[in-house]
Image (tube, grey):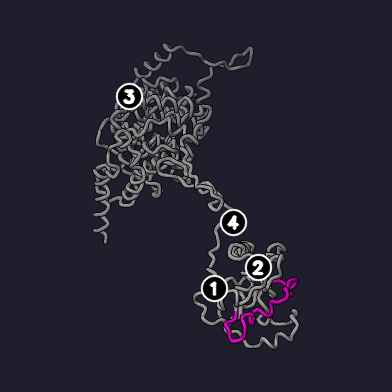
Amino acid sequence: FFRQGYGDPHWQYPAATYGNDYPYQGQQWQPVAWQNDRDLRQGEPHGRSASYRDQHYYRGYHPNLATGPPGHDSCPSALGAGKQRCPWFLSQVCVLPSLQPLGQPSLLLQYHESGLSSSSHELSQYIRDGADQYDPLLPGPWNMEQTGGSVVSTPTPVVPLKFLQPHTALCFGAGGQLVLACPYHPADGQRACVELHSLEAILHGTKELEELQAFPGPLAREDLHKGDVMTFCQQKIATGCDLSTQRGRDACLLWKLLVLLCRQNGSMVGSDTAELLMQDCRRQQKYQRQEPAASLVGLAEEEWVSRQLGTLDLITGEVPLVVETQAQIVEKFTKLLYYGRKKDALVWAMRNQLWGHALFLSSKMDPRTYSWVLAGFTSTLATNDPLQTLFQLLSGRIPQAALCCGDATWGDWRPHLAVLLSNKAGDMELNHRAIITMGDTLASKGAVEAAHFCYLMADIPFGYFGAKVDRMALLGSSHRQAFAQFASTEAIQRMEVFEYCQQLRQPESFLLPFQVYKLLYAARLADHGLPAQALQYCEQISTVLLLQDPATHPVLAQQVVRLAERLKLSDPLLLEMPEQDKTLEPDWLEQLRACCQEWKVRSE
């Protein structure tokens, strides 16, 4: 008769509070001794000043509903003297006919319809249970004789449903399927309906799926021809790069570099890259030449001007410029040398742009004089002239272009890098540092693609996303931004093409930090309904990890095993051989799982 765990039939229910916008919060019933003051309560009116513990439970729900139906006060003694009294819960929930007039809705239903209940969901469960187990329209009053002198109704605890109405449940399957469990009513004879939908068909025409389908990955498979990879890169150049912006041109340059690497099986020299840089240069800039500084040729500014002017014209009052032919300039240079006036000859040659004569003559003199003439020559070049970059590098200094490139006023950075790549002579360490410095300067100004191009030329290794001191993690994507923007599908595809080009030159080479992004790419393939292609990526990652010690990357190995176990039935070999045992697993999966288990045992 009573609920399990309730040994004493006498209960007193704690008072409800009106805090936190909930009229009723006592949803967990705590058994306490019922005070024997029933006779006193019968003589008291149930006003607001009375204690809630001295009132019936239903009368404490709301002041407007404090007056209950007749007959409820006699519920504790309804079973007769000396019998166990019916608990209030059964009298209110079950709505026994003797306590509820025929045809009148239950009190809980009145609460529910009045909108005064704070938990309509809880009330709906009680009302439903009362309607399912008891019929309020049973004829005749209820008494003990109808049941043979004993109570036979045994209410069962009700577990509230999570949802009030039937609804569609769905989940994503590992095989690229969307599983729908449609709502149904078993009581009405309806049969359950489960629908399977292909995610590839649902997502057909979306940009994300088309981007994944256009890529011929994984690129490490044997049936792939490098012409397919080059075609993919050329399509990205034609459709994915905005050539009207500097960043779009830099991204186009990266794709062109990958095409060049793929065509030449992963090898290239500086002149090849310089040619690529100059082809992709938007326009050939014309750098302005200027007169050498007067201080460098040993003359004051006024004396420099006076030597360029002729004699005064008495008619016009003007001093015309003296225009000398090239032959006259050389003849005067020679006459000065006749008399042994080398210093004057150098000044004359520098003033009249005879730099070849001046440099050769100064090279046969002392080093200080040679440096003086060389400085005068470089002062005639524009600051952003690539010749200035070359001469500064040959002089043993980091070129100014490596520190200032990327500015709109400085000009294009590509001619300067082409000069550095095509003239790797002398101090190779200085050349290497100059290229890295140029990449750092471009990266600091937001030109990520251009900076990564420089890093590739300097053979900078790839790092990890969490290591912000590393210069690169994914080719053409900055690892200093949010991960969602960093690990884009295009960046992962571009990185895989670069790894493929490296493998064309050295088949056993791979980029270990890149394997985690392959796993991420495989998960995206599975999410878009391409499980077979995702399983192939898991196999390629497993091959790389088995060549190494999987214990060095335990988390990556475990995640590959987990994803591969869900995708293993999508193996094309199993689809082609239906008689094949479905419990069989690929050898690479078994080996990788064994390595993970071995590492787990050793770590324990």
Q: Mark 1 belongs to which amino acid?
A: Val
| Chain-order first, disc 2 or disc 3 | 2
Q: Mark 3 belongs to which amino acid?
A: Arg
Name the side, left or right, on which 578 lies relative to 97: left
Name the side, left or right, on which 194 lies relative to 473: right
Specify the segment rendered in magenta.
61-85
Question: In front of the other: label 4 or label 2?
Answer: 4
Disc 2 + disc 3, Cβ < 8 Å: no
Disc 3 crowd rating (10 Å Cα; few below 14, some 14-19, many 20+) is some
Q: Which residue is mark 1?
A: 152
Residue 141, compared with residue 238, is above or below; it is: below
Give the distance between the C-alpha atoms of the residues marked 4 and 3, in whole angstroms. Answer: 64 Å
Q: Which residue is mark 3?
A: 263
| Chain-order first, disc 4 or disc 2 | 2
Residue 459, compared with residue 185, is above or below; it is: above
Secondary structure of the magenta portion, mostly? loop
Q: Position of residue 421 (x, y in %)?
A: 35, 29
Question: In front of the other: label 4 or label 3?
Answer: 4
For residue 22, the mark is 2
| Chain-order first, disc 3 or disc 1 | 1
Q: Which residue is mark 4?
A: 164
Q: Does dot 1 land on a helix, a strand or a loop?
A: loop
Residue 299 in view here: no
| Chain-order first, disc 1 or disc 2 | 2
Disc 1 + disc 2, Cβ < 8 Å: no
Q: Mark 2 belongs to which amino acid?
A: Tyr
Question: In front of the other: label 2 or label 3?
Answer: 2
